[in-house]
Image (tube, grey):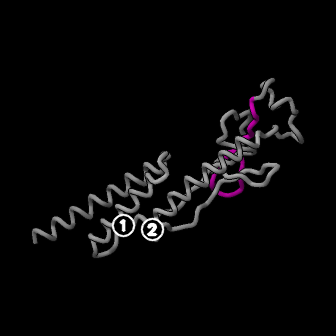
């Protein structure tokens, strides 16, 4: 299932006000329309009414979230090196100042190095370090770290078997 936020998602102070199901492909899409809790709690912020059906956006919070997301993903990418299987893919929202990142992801090559458990072990260690590189790992980062740890354990087991042979 894909989740699409109508306006800035993942920004503190925003709450879901309606949910619509839609989508043409076989993949279900959940569209969440958001409104900002302002002084009146009705989608207005800082005394400014929502324009054109969209809530007023606290640009400072959105810019801070954008900077945090980009720094988080850059830390992963710089540590992953050749094991990044994609560029950073950002989830963005439209703001008056242009698109802002509210989330991001990088595909990671978690495949074993065929016939070379030592290289697999080195690769898994790099991926494990990259998963924790930002210092504030997400749940997805923890899943990648767990998979890297599994890859490390398998490589160590293969190396142990090779040494006994």
Q: Is residue 26 magenta?
A: yes
Q: Does dot 2 land on a helix, a strand or a loop? A: helix
Whether label 1 touches label 2, CB < 8 Å: yes
Q: Which of 137/3 is in front? A: 137
The residue lying at 40 percent from left, 57 percent from top is 129
Tag shown at residue 83: 2
Which image quarter holds the C terminus?
bottom left
Number of the label disc, if any, that sits on residue 147: none
Q: Earlier in the sequence, mark 1 or mark 2?
A: 2
Q: Residues within 10 Å of mark 1 (few under 14, many from 20)?
A: many
Residue 38: where, in percent of width, then height? 77, 28
Q: Position of residue 145 (x, y in %)?
A: 40, 53
| Mark carried by residue 123 | 1
Q: Is residue 120 left or right of residue 141?
A: left
Per the rendered image, the range of residues in magenta is 21-37
Residue 146 lies left or right of residue 95; in this view the side is left
Q: Residue at x 68, y 48 (%)?
A: 4
């Amino acid at each position: 299932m894909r989740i699409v936020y109508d306006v800035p998602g993942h920004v503190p102070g925003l709450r879901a006000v309606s949910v619509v199901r839609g989508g043409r492909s076989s993949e279900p899409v959940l569209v969440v329309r958001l409104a900002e809790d302002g002084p009146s709690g009705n989608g207005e912020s800082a005394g400014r009414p929502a324009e054109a059906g969209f809530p007023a956006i606290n640009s400072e919070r959105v810019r801070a979230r954008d900077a945090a997301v980009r720094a988080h993903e850059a830390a992963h990418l710089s540590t992953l090196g050749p094991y990044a299987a994609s560029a950073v893919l950002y989830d963005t929202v439209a703001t008056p100042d242009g698109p802002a990142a509210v989330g991001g992801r990088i595909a990671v090559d978690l495949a074993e190095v065929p016939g070379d458990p030592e290289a697999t072990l080195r690769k898994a260690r790099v991926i494990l370090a990259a998963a924790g590189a930002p210092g504030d790992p997400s749940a997805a980062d923890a899943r990648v770290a767990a998979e890297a740890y599994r890859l490390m354990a398998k490589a160590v087991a293969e190396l142990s078997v090779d040494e006994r042979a």
